[in-house]
């Protein structure tokens, strides 16, 4: 086993995780502040969808899955993945496949090889800035893409989503994301219960007609702005306790006091989470979100004792929600996707026999990490997210992922894509592509020229990106 993370990192990491609250205490919008209008006869799927509490495409609620969106924010480490696994590892979706989740990854304290492994497992990797800053400048957003591509082998085209640290974003953030070719943002709050006739718990929508969430919170938002055709917002859906609109709980609700009490009460938390779920499920089936900072709930993090009662409570909620299910048969983004690779093949896919001997340890004092793709000569920074590779004596440089191979099939030593044709199914979100054996296109990660429009934006793509899901009918 690798000593993935040094113990010296504990204090700063925990401070970082705890600093990222992003809570709300009341409504963040109103119908008047929204001033939203959208002509559904003109704004149509797959490229356009009006902000609406009703399911997209005119579907009846009984015909759409009840999604549970599970997300995690901040650094990816063995502790955080252990934490997520204690909730999702033993579960199955109704179609028999393992639930997948979305990891909004920031890079301080991140162990890149674990990002690779988590992605190959089928989870979504999304952008949360390099160094965890709110209202981020563009180099924080682009640098995250470039470093994740270079050092974790995440295909650029699969990094489709963004969440702002502290949920602190601006009109400029959204414009920047749309320009860079992201498919969606998920930083806005749905702050009014679904039972409210003016609820802002909209299904994911495109910003062709501007934003309809956070109108009271973010300057310059709403009343038709910002208009970003084909760019989507996936609101974060709050839970509500007995105080209703005055008792919203957004991120890590299990850390909050329920019903105005002065201390945490897990049974009260479970009760309001179930009540909010039921309101969604029996109403218009807007997704329910479990937005976590998994470090809080890790049982393997030295010196931290996550309360078992809280962990049990969350699992109890998930068990209960899964029991509400019928069948979810053939929704493509939820299908199982396990890459098939011979056990003697040397690639970085999180499977020990494949990965053995491939990892480099990059001993940077602030946050050492492992990578399959060769250590950089210096730690990545916003001004240089992809420093030159440091090549040990007697070795050759590792080949980094080109744009037409999937992570799970990339041999970083030979510089070869090990899979062609119909077997090329793992990891990447563009599984229909068919790379040829001879035409690799190396990614030039230097500079910030991330081309716009790299990522396809379809509604299924967006819903597929909401992959922290346990789908239930
Ligand atoms: Zn964060």
Image (cartoon, rainbow, N blue to C red):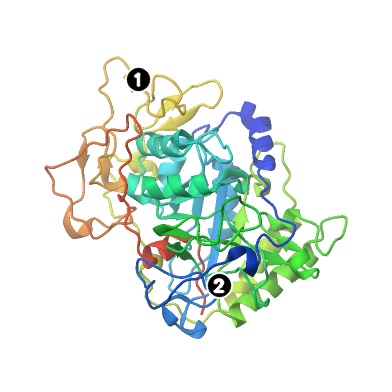
Of badges 2 and 1, nearer the viewer stands 2
Q: Which percent across, then down, holds residue 382?
A: 46, 29
Q: Which percent across, then down, holds residue 115?
A: 45, 42
- SS category of the residue bearing label 2: loop
Q: Nearer the viewer, residue 435 or 354?
A: 435
Q: Which percent across, then down, holds residue 438?
A: 11, 42
- The label on residue 390 is 1
**Crowd class of label 1 (few under 14; some 14 to 19; many from 20; radius 10 Å):** some
The quarter holding residue 370 reads top left
Left or right of 141 in this view: 275: right
Left or right of 396 in this view: 119: right
Left or right of 394 in this view: 469: right
Q: Nearer the viewer, residue 199 or 108?
A: 199
- SS category of the residue bearing label 1: loop
Where does label 2 land, which residue? 286
Give the vertical position of 69 relative to 220 (above or below): below
- The reply to whether discs 2 and 1 touch (Cβ–Cβ < 8 Å) is no
Q: Nearer the viewer, residue 412 or 271?
A: 271
Give the vertical position of 286 relative to 296 (above or below): below
Q: Which percent across, then down, holds residue 333?
A: 38, 65
């Amino acid at each position: 086993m690798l000593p993935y993370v040094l113990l010296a990192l504990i204090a700063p990491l925990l401070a970082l995780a705890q600093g990222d609250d992003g809570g709300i205490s009341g409504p963040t919008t109103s119908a008047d502040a929204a001033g939203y209008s959208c002509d559904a006869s003109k704004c149509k799927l797959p490229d356009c969808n009006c902000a609406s509490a009703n399911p997209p495409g005119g579907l009846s609620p009984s015909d759409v899955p009840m999604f549970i969106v599970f997300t995690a924010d901040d650094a990816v480490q063995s502790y955080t993945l252990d934490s997520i696994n204690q909730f999702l590892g033993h579960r199955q979706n109704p179609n028999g496949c393992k639930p997948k989740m979305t990891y909004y990854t920031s890079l301080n304290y991140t162990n890149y090889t674990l990002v690779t492994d988590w992605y190959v497992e089928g989870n979504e990797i999304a952008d949360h800035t390099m160094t965890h800053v709110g209202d981020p400048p563009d180099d924080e957003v682009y640098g995250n893409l470039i470093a994740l591509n270079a050092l974790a082998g995440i295909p650029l085209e699969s990094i489709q989503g963004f969440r702002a640290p502290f949920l602190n974003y601006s009109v400029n953030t959204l414009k920047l994301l749309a320009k860079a070719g992201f498919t969606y943002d998920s930083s806005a709050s749905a702050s009014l219960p679904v039972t409210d006739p003016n609820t802002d718990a909209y299904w994911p929508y495109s910003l062709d007609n501007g934003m309809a969430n956070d109108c009271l919170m973010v300057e310059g938002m709403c009343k038709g702005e910002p208009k970003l055709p084909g760019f989507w917002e996936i609101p974060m859906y709050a839970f509500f306790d007995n105080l209703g609109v005055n008792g919203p709980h957004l991120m890590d609700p299990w850390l909050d006091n329920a019903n105005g009490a002065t201390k945490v009460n897990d049974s009260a938390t479970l009760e309001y989470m179930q009540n909010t779920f039921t309101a969604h499920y029996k109403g218009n089936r807007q997704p329910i979100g479990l937005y976590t900072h998994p470090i809080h709930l890790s049982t393997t993090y030295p010196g931290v004792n996550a309360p078992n009662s809280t962990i049990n409570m969350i699992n109890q909620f998930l068990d209960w929600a899964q029991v509400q299910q019928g069948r979810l048969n053939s929704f493509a983004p939820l299908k199982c996707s396990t890459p098939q690779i011979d056990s003697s093949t040397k690639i970085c896919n999180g499977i020990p026999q494949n990965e053995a001997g491939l990892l480099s340890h990059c001993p940077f004092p602030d946050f050492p990490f492992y990578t399959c793709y060769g250590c950089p000569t210096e730690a990545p920074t916003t001004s240089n997210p992809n420093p030159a590779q440091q090549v040990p004596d007697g070795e050759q440089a590792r080949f980094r992922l080109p744009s037409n191979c999937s992570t799970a099939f990339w041999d970083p030593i030979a510089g070869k894509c090990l899979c062609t044709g119909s077997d090329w199914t793992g990891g990447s979100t563009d599984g229909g592509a068919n790379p040829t054996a001879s035409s690799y296109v190396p990614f030039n990660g230097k500079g910030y020229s991330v081309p716009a429009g790299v990522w396809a934006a379809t509604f299924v793509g967006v819903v597929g990106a909401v992959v922290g899901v346990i789908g239930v009918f």
